[in-house]
Image (cartoon, grey):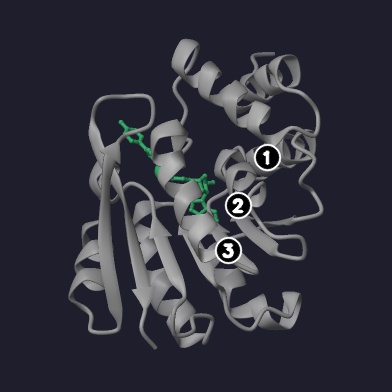
């Protein structure tokens, strides 16, 4: 039977990356996506912006919405301090299965909790299930029409504190117009756009970094 693109991406990691070396996993995926098959990972160019925001925030608690194959999960987790926790939500079981193996190959399973399910169902359960009070950093990279409703849900559930950072991928391409309008016009956020390019292409895209002001 035919393999899927995520399965072929995992194969490239297992073939070209060194077990326990997150940077080699990231490099193997970027090489696969540039040379073989495009895939919707945040990629190397926007990935450097992601790295700089993670390093600056130095978060103890991170929430990622939309794991896919685990590329950004590995990038983020590899930069976390010792006892920090990254919870990543993925509702497609096939993607989740691939992501688990990518995260394991990188040797980061102790820092990552991959939860299979929909963000809308799990955001309200974060505190009771994982003992998380608030998130220091949220990386939004799931269905683009879910960014705004999930942000409002996180506010309602008290998961954001004064200074929590939201970092959103694809605010230009494919685009998240309602989310962008919200974080840029709301007095409760201070937003900044990081211009970049759609992963592995010359098309414009960027990340929006928004600080929750409480
Ligand atoms: C609500 C919810 N809960 C849990 N997991 C969720 C979820 N919604 C999606 N997910 C999971 O996240 C992943 C979805 C990500 C959606 N990302 C995209 O659709 C996406 C699309 C492009 C793109 C750009 C130009 C083009 F021409 C074509 C594609 C680029 C990107 O960087 C993207 O993130 C996989 C899915 O199972
Ligand atoms: Mg994306």
Q: Are marks 1 and 2 in contact (CB under 8 Å)?
A: yes
Question: Quadrant of residue 26 in the image?
Answer: top right
Residue 40, can we see it?
no
Q: Quadrant of the N terminus?
A: top right
Residue underneath mark 2: 90
Q: Which mark is residue 58?
A: 3
Of labels 2 and 3, earlier in sequence is 3
Of labels 1 and 3, earlier in sequence is 3
Residue underneath mark 1: 99
Q: Are marks 1 and 3 in contact (CB under 8 Å)?
A: no
Q: Secondary structure at mark 2?
A: strand
Q: Is residue 153 left or right of residue 58?
A: left
Q: Distance between the Cα atoms at labels 1 and 2?
A: 9 Å
Question: Is the CB atom of the residue marked by disc 2 within 8 angstroms of ligand 1's nearest atom?
Answer: yes
- Against 168, residue 29 (above or below) is above
From the top left corner, tell me how far across and down residue 143 is, in percent. 41, 52
From the top left corner, tell me how far across and down residue 57 is, in percent. 51, 65
- Against 193, residue 51 (above or below) is above
From the top left corner, tell me how far across and down residue 86 is, in percent. 66, 60
Q: Is residue 132 left or right of residue 109?
A: left
Question: Quadrant of residue 167 in the image?
Answer: bottom left
Within 10 Å of the Cα at label 1, are there few (<14), some (14-19), or many (20+) other Cα atoms? many
Q: Secondary structure at mark 1?
A: helix
């Amino acid at each position: 039977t035919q393999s899927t693109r995520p399965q072929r991406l995992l194969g490239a990691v297992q073939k070209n990356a060194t077990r326990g070396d997150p940077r080699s996993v990231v490099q193997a995926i970027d090489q696969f996506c540039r040379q073989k098959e495009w895939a919707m990972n945040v990629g190397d160019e926007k990935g450097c912006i992601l790295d700089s925001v993670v390093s600056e925030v130095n978060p103890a608690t991170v929430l990622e919405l939309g794991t896919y194959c685990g590329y950004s999960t590995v990038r983020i987790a590899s930069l976390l301090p010792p006892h920090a926790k990254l919870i990543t939500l993925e509702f497609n079981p096939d993607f989740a299965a691939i992501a688990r193996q990518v995260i394991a190959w990188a040797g980061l399973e102790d820092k990552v909790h991959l939860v299979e399910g929909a963000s809308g169902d799990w955001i309200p359960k974060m505190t009771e299930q994982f003992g998380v009070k608030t998130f220091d950093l949220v990386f939004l990279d799931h269905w683009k029409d879910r960014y705004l409703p999930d942000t409002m849900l996180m506010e309602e559930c008290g998961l954001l504190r004064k200074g929590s950072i939201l970092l959103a991928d694809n605010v230009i391409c494919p685009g998240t117009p309602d989310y962008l309008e919200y974080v840029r016009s709301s007095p409760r956020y201070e937003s900044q756009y990081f211009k970049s390019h759609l992963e592995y292409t010359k098309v414009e895209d960027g990340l929006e970094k928004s600080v929750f002001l409480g």
